[in-house]
Every structure is written in C-alpha cells, then in structure tokens.
Image: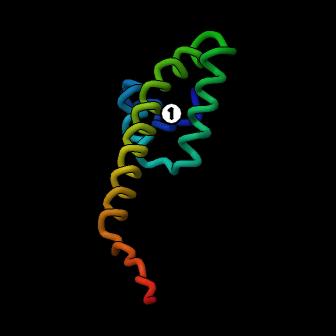
Amino acid sequence: MSGIDKRPKDEPAVDPTARYQLIIPNLSDTDLASLQANATRLSQDDTGRRQQEAVMLLPLVDAELAVRKTAKTAAAAAKRKLAKPRVKAIAST
C-alpha cells in the first residue's frame, strides 16, 4: 500500500489518477517540485507498480506546474500594468 492510500480496507479502490488530481492542486510549490523530482527518478530507475504510478503522475504534475507558471506570469503582467509610470525629471538649464 502506498503512503498516500490511507483508505479503510472496506472502502472501494479509487482510480489513482483521480486521487492525485485532488491532491496535486493543494500542494505547495516546494512539495510539487519535490514530487516531480521523485516521480521523474522513479519513472526512470524503478520497475513495477511504483514506476507505473510515477509515469502516470508526471503529466499531472507537469500540467499543474504549467497552470501555476501561467498564473504567476499573468499576475506579474497585471502588477506591471497597474504600476505607476515613472516620470523623468526634466533638467532645467
């Protein structure tokens, strides 16, 4: 049983993709980066079930990272747009 699967034994199994889709958006940026690094490592070095889960997980993590990057870029652009333009002082002669 994986560390994330903490359901009671009598509860039906949930599709791992659906479970991760609920968990991933709530992770911090640091945790998401760590998850991506671990999933990448496991998808390349491990075998069996852990490798399969890592391969399945990577596109979900990459999609969430892309969403966050787009949101940060949009927020930065909005902030720049709202910033007051700097006025150059005109030197008198």
Please tell me which residue lies in front, 68 or 35: 68
Work out which residue is located at the far right of the displayed protein and give it.
45
Graded by Cα atoms within 10 Å as few (under 14), some (14 to 19) or many (20 or more), the crowding at tag 1 reads few
Please tell me which residue lies in front, 47 or 74: 74
Residue occupying image coordinates x 41% and y 45%: 68
Image location (x, y in percent) of residue 52: 53, 15
**Is residue 9 positioned above or below 91 on the image?**
above
Residue occupying image coordinates x 57% and y 40%: 33
Q: Is residue 50 visible?
A: yes
Image location (x, y in percent) of residue 73: 39, 50
- Tally of numbered tags: 1
Please tell me which residue lies in front, 33 or 24: 33
Work out which residue is located at the far top of the displayed protein and give it.
48
**Quadrant where the N terminus lies?**
top right
Residue occupying image coordinates x 51% and y 51%: 28
Q: Is residue 13 visible?
A: no
Quarter residue 70 falls in: top left
Image location (x, y in percent) of residue 53: 52, 20
Residue at numbered disc 1: 5
Quarter residue 47 falls in: top right
Residue occupying image coordinates x 57% and y 45%: 31
Element on which disc 1 rests: loop
Work out which residue is located at the far front of the displayed protein and give it.
93
**Quadrant where the C terminus lies?**
bottom left
Image location (x, y in percent) of residue 46: 67, 15
**Is residue 25 positioned above or below 61 on the image?**
below
Residue type pointed to by label 1: Asp
